[in-house]
Image (cartoon, rainbow, N blue to C red):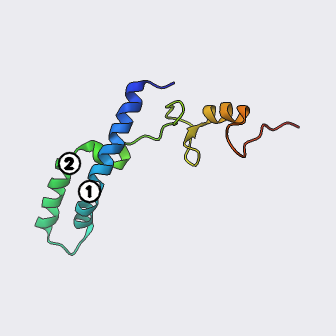
Amino acid sequence: MAKVSAVEKNKRRRKTVALHAEKRAALKAIIKNQETPIEERFKATLKLAELPRDGSMTRVRNRCEVSGRPRAYYRKLKMSRIALRELGSLGKVPGVVKSSW
């Protein structure tokens, strides 16, 4: 089980990303547009720098919904390989069967 503080920090980051996503996208569009004047793009860069760092999607870490583990994460199932194995053995994940030969 991961530290509760790390899981909560990640949840807070996801909320911050959702809150600032629209504004960040608009500023990035201005910055990337080569046809806008350089002064305007520079002002947009400064405004983007004023936004909180945790508002960026790259700051969010994919974590297992069951255990909070940050590594070996399956995006499709939103859980780690260890949690998948445990729940799969118990028969709680549909379509997952223990193999034997």
Quadrant in the picture for the C terminus: top right
* Left or right of 6, for residue 40: left
Question: Residue 57, image x and y in percent?
Answer: 36, 49
Please name the residue shown 15% across and 54% down the image: 46
Task: Check disc 1 and report the residue beneath it.
Answer: 24
Toward the viewer: 63 or 65?
Answer: 65
Question: Residue 59, image x and y in percent?
Answer: 35, 42
* Left or right of 63, for residue 92: right
**SS for dot 1:** helix
Please name the residue shown 20% across and 48% down the image: 51
Q: Quadrant of residue 7?
A: top left
Question: Residue 24, image x and y in percent?
Answer: 26, 56
- In the figure, 16 relative to 83: above or below? below
Toward the viewer: 58 or 67?
Answer: 67
Please name the residue shown 43% across and 24% down the image: 3
* Left or right of 73, for residue 98: right
* Callouts 2 and 1 close, C-beta under 8 Å: yes
Q: Crowdedness of circle 2 by 10 Å Cα count: few (<14), some, many (20+)?
A: few
